[in-house]
Amino acid sequence: MEEREEEQENEEEKRVINVVVAVDASEESMNACEWACRNLLAANTNIRQAYNFILLHVQAPVCVSSGPAYILSNEVVHILQNDQVRTTQKILKRARAICNRYNVEAHSYVVTGKPKEKICEAAHKLGAQFLVMGSHDHGPLI
C-alpha cells in the first residue's frame, strides 16, 4: 500500500511542468510573458494544474573599468549595483503584473552574465520543458 502511494507521489512530481519566461526591459519580452500566460497555460489545463512559472532575468555584470586612468570608488560601484537591483525589480514587477492579470503564480530567478549563455544554462538548471522568449530581431539563439 505504501509503495503504491509513493509511486503516485513520484508520478505527480514528474507531471510538474517548468515554464521559464526570459524577461528584460523590452516590450518583446513582456509580450512573450503575456503570451505564455494567456496561451500556454490557458490552452492546456493539465499544465495549469501542476506548473512552475518562472520569470528569468539576466542582469549584465556591473561594468567597472579600472586602471591608472580610471578608478571608481567603492561608493560609485555600490551606486551602480543598487541601480541594477532597482532596474531588475522594475522588470520583474512589470512581468508579475502581467502574470497576476491571468492568475498565474510566478517565481523569479535572476542570474548575472551574457543573456545568450545564461538563459540556456538557467533553462537547463531549472529543468524547463518550455522556454519562452521575446525576439529583438538579433537572429536565432545559438
Image: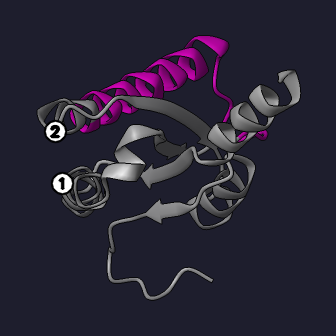
Q: Disc 2 residue type?
A: Tyr
Estimate how packed mark 2 is, as few (under 14), some (14 to 19) or many (20 or more) residues with alpha carbons within 10 Å: some
Q: Is residue 64 visible?
A: no
**Position above or below: 46 against 69:** below
Query: What amino acid does circle 1 point to?
Result: Arg
Q: Secondary structure at mark 1?
A: helix
Quarter placement of the C terminus: bottom right
Residue 35, picture quadrant:
bottom left
Left or right of 109 in this view: 10? right
According to the picture, the residue beneath numbered tag 2 turns out to be: 102
Name, please, the residue furthest toward the top: 75
- Please rate how many residues cluster around mark 1, counting C-alpha atoms within 10 Å: few if below 14, some from 14 to 19, many from 20: some
| Residue 90 placement (x, y as % from top left) | 28, 28
Q: Is residue 141 left or right of residue 41?
A: right
Q: Main secondary structure of the magenta part?
A: helix
The residue positioned farthest toward the front in the image shown: 1
Residue contact between numbered discs 1 and 2, judged by CB atoms under 8 Å: yes
- Examine the image and state in which quarter residue 10 appears: top right
Distance in Å between CA atoms under marks 1 and 2: 7 Å
Please give the range of residues in magenta. Answer: 66-95
Residue 97, x across and y down, in percent: 18, 31
* 24 or 101: nearer the viewer: 101
